Amino acid sequence: MGARTFTAKDRLLFALAGLLGPCLIRLLGAACRYRLDGEEHLRAASSPRAGVILAPWHGRMLLPLYHFRNQRISALVSLH
């Protein structure tokens, strides 16, 4: 497969998504009421020297991103 080239419109949409995406996550997180079950297991598994991998279901990723927003997490995404 060759490298994909992006049009100016694509690059503009990527930039807008990068700017508006975090705002949308904050708004949705603040507007939703949720319950986190099993957080004690997460705290017990994590330490300053070890990382933890969270695996939320595809349709359930926004609220974990909101809940763990100030904890230096990263999200892994792919085209598949």
Image (cartoon, helix red, strand yellow):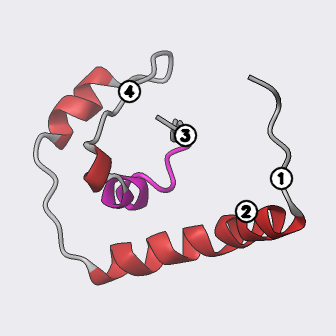
Secondary structure at numbered mark 4: loop
CB atoms of marks 2 and 1 within 8 Å: yes
Which residue is identified by label 1? 6
Secondary structure at numbered mark 1: loop
Which residue is identified by label 4? 53
- Which label is found at residue 72? none
CB atoms of marks 3 and 4 within 8 Å: no
Marks 4 and 1, the one that precedes in the sequence? 1
CB atoms of marks 1 and 3 within 8 Å: no
Amino acid at pointer 2: Phe
Distance from disc 4 to disc 1, alpha carbons, whole Å, reads 31 Å
Identify the residue at horizontal 56%, vertical 43% (top origin).
72
Distance from disc 2 to disc 1, alpha carbons, whole Å, reads 10 Å
Query: Residue 67 vs residue 36: left or right?
Result: right
Marks 4 and 2, the one that precedes in the sequence? 2
Identify the residue at horizontal 55%, vertical 40% (top origin).
74
Q: Quadrant of the N terminus?
A: top right
Amino acid at pointer 3: Ser
Task: Please identify, in this view, whether the residue under mark 4 or under mark 2 is nearer the observer.
Answer: 2
Segment colored magenta: 62-72
| Position of residue 61 measured from the top left corner of the image (x, y, whole percent) | 35, 52
Marks 1 and 3, the one that precedes in the sequence? 1
Secondary structure at numbered mark 3: loop
Q: Residue furthest top?
A: 49
Which residue is identified by label 3? 74
Marks 3 and 2, the one that precedes in the sequence? 2
| Position of residue 40 measured from the top left corner of the image (x, y, whole percent) | 17, 37
